[in-house]
Amino acid sequence: MLSMLMTTEYAPAEDRHELQQLLIHIAGGEREALAELYQRTRSAVYGLALSYLKNAQDAQDLTQDVYVQVWDCAAQYRPTGSPMGWLLAVCRNLCLTRLRREERHAALSEEEWDAIPARECGLDADERALLQGALASLADEERRIVLLHAVTGLKHRESAALLELPLPTVLSKYHRALKKMRSFLEGDDAR
């Protein structure tokens, strides 16, 4: 289970190219391309939104807002960057705008963690519960860093740029988070 979190290259070049092509088609007004982009990226967008907003309904609403924004602004995407990075930057910006507007911070409930789409991660219910528990043991920033790398496939430098953190900070928090998760999964409470 942790091996999927430790992979360094999640999104092969052909996947990046396909996402870039989808964004180009969306900029040209093709609704089918937007539907395909949504199907391929919604879990990552929802996961990031949930990590910021800490409310399942708000995260679902914001996920929809992200794709509306993508439809409106796809022409602004430049194929020199990571398409997933651009999409997650849109999500992050909308999350921060909403948080500034609402100025609220709440704990994530069990039901909200359970709202994360299960079929996307390929885990059975027990493995999923263990992973959710391990993720819940992390600080918010650590959780975001792990999710950005493991779920969305962003490289650490892309995560650092997205979160506006120095790369060494992201790397150390990522490795510290993995150690915490490993300790949690092995039943060792000495973090």
Image (cartoon, helix red, strand yellow):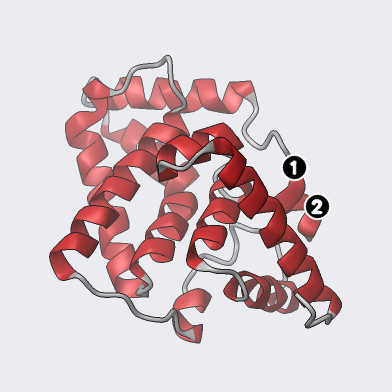
Question: Which quadrant would residue 7 be assigned to in this image?
Answer: top right
Question: Which quadrant would residue 130 be assigned to in this image?
Answer: bottom right
Residue type pointed to by label 1: Thr
**Residue at the spot 65% in from the left edge and 27% down from the top edge:** 12
Given residues 108 and 191, the one toward you in this image is: 191
**Residue at the spot 31% in from the left edge and 75% down from the top edge:** 105
Tally the marks. Answer: 2
Q: Quadrant of the N terminus?
A: bottom right
**Residue at the spot 32% in from the left edge and 37% down from the top edge:** 34
Given residues 191 and 101, the one toward you in this image is: 191
Q: Is residue 75 left or right of residue 164?
A: left
SS for dot 1: loop
- Which class describes the residues within 10 Å of circle 2: few (<14), some (14-19), or many (20+)? few
**Residue at the spot 33% in from the left edge and 67% down from the top edge:** 53
Q: Where is residue 160 in the image (x, y as percent from the top left)?
A: 50, 39
Given residues 102 and 152, the one toward you in this image is: 102
Pointers 1 and 2 in contact (CB under 8 A)? yes
Check the image and report above or below for 163 versus 101.
above
Is residue 78 in sight in this rendering?
yes
Is residue 35 in sight in this rendering?
no
Check the image and report above or below for 169 versus 188.
above
Q: Quadrant of the C terminus?
A: bottom right
Q: Position of residue 25 (x, y in %)?
A: 32, 22
Q: Position of residue 184 (x, y in %)?
A: 76, 76
- Which class describes the residues within 10 Å of circle 1: few (<14), some (14-19), or many (20+)? few
Residue type pointed to by label 2: Ser
The residue labelled by disc 1 is 7
The residue labelled by disc 2 is 3
Question: Which quadrant would residue 79 be assigned to in this image?
Answer: top left
Task: Give the Cα distance between marks 1 and 2.
Answer: 6 Å
